[in-house]
Image (spheres, rainbow, N blue to C red):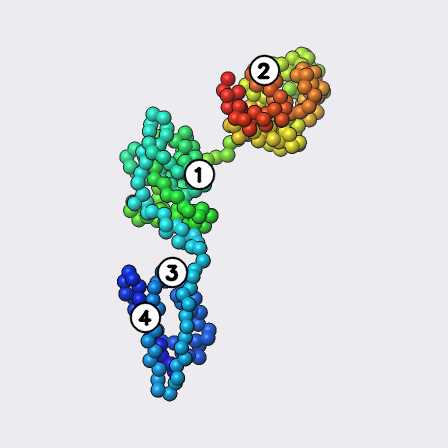
Amino acid sequence: MLTYSFFFLSHHRYRTSMATLNLSSLQSLSFHRLFSSFPQNTPTLSFNFQPKPSVNPRPISLKPYVSEKPRARVVALAVNSLGETEAVAVSPENGESAGELPSGAGVYAVYDANGEVQFIGLSRNIAASVAAHWKSVPELCGSIKAGIVDEPDRESLTQAWKSWMEECIKVSGKVPPGNESGNATWVRQPPKRKADLRLTPGRHVQLTVPLENLIDTLVKENKVVAFIKGPRSAPLCGFSQRVIAILENQGVDYESINVLDEDYNYGLRETLKKYSNWPTFPQIFVDGELVGGCDILTSMYEKGELASLFKK
């Protein structure tokens, strides 16, 4: 049996580790696994062999193991602890932070005016998430702590969030109110989509006013009206789908009419073409005036002109 005693020397401090290895199992030993937990910059590996007289030891050459790029566990540890992170005050006058909040991905904690943690979250865009919280619960947003994760994959973000949560619970003895089960105050709820409007009570019901008059009343009494092919929840053509996506992205409160609904909007397509003098669909009206179809709306969107249009 051959006994090896080996020592690790680090420029930070001395660490001594001794182990006894059975020579017969030496081939199955993974030195990479053995040394992978040590820092990459360990400068010296020295071995002191103490063979028994009956055995001729053979020299063993070991190359330092170069680990792969640090994964989530290491990235999470790179984020400062909750206690070490500096808080950024939120201005009650304008709803903005007094300092710059990062727009990158990471973990953040929201404190109320009394310095109590209300919520710890993770986000792909911390600044946008904090802005949304301010709009929904400004009375709970006194200051913010934020930590950026350099490699924001799902695992690293989760690890960073867990480390802050565990620290918060250890210090306060409780889960932040916003993170308690069943609390939906801090979770952005998907907006409820309106139902499409119907111009008539039914195809077989006799109208008392011309359909063109109903169209005129509809577009003049509503800020934004989109005449599309199919329901707004599932448009039936790419142009209508594009228009709905733009309106949703702009956060516009709009009404929609399905021109393909022959039960409640019978005859609408031909009547609307004459009313607007526009031959195709979709058609978008703002303040009673025809803006155009998909191409025009897309062009205005790309030029940043829609915000001013909808604010008029």
Q: Quadrant of residue 82?
A: top left
Q: Is residue 268 toward the left or the right of residue 30 in the image?
A: right
**Disc on res. 125:** 1
What separation in Å lies between label 2 and label 1 (alpha carbons)?
Answer: 37 Å
The residue at the far bottom in this view is 54
Q: Within 10 Å of the Cα at label 3, are there few (<14), some (14-19), or many (20+) other Cα atoms?
A: few
Instruction: Report the quarter where the N terminus lies.
Output: bottom left
Q: Nearer the viewer, mark 4 or mark 2?
A: 4
Q: Earlier in the sequence, mark 4 or mark 3?
A: 4
Q: Are marks 4 and 3 in contact (CB under 8 Å)?
A: no
Q: Are marks 4 and 2 in contact (CB under 8 Å)?
A: no
**Nearest the eye: 6 or 74:** 6
At 56% from the left and 16% from the top, the residue drawn is 287
What separation in Å lies between label 1 and label 4 (alpha carbons)?
Answer: 47 Å
Q: Which residue is mark 4?
A: 7
Q: Earlier in the sequence, mark 1 or mark 3?
A: 3
Q: Earlier in the sequence, mark 4 or mark 2?
A: 4
Q: Earlier in the sequence, mark 2 or mark 1?
A: 1
At 50% from the left and 17% from the top, the residue drawn is 312
**Compared with residue 114, is residue 266 higher up or lower down, i.e. above or below?**
above
Q: Which residue is mark 2?
A: 288
At 66% from the left and 31% from the top, the residue drawn is 237
Q: Which residue is mark 3?
A: 40
Amino acid, disc 2: Gly
Q: Earlier in the sequence, mark 3 or mark 2?
A: 3
Q: Within 10 Å of the Cα at label 2, are there few (<14), some (14-19), or many (20+) other Cα atoms?
A: some
Q: Nearer the viewer, mark 1 or mark 4?
A: 4
Amino acid, disc 4: Phe
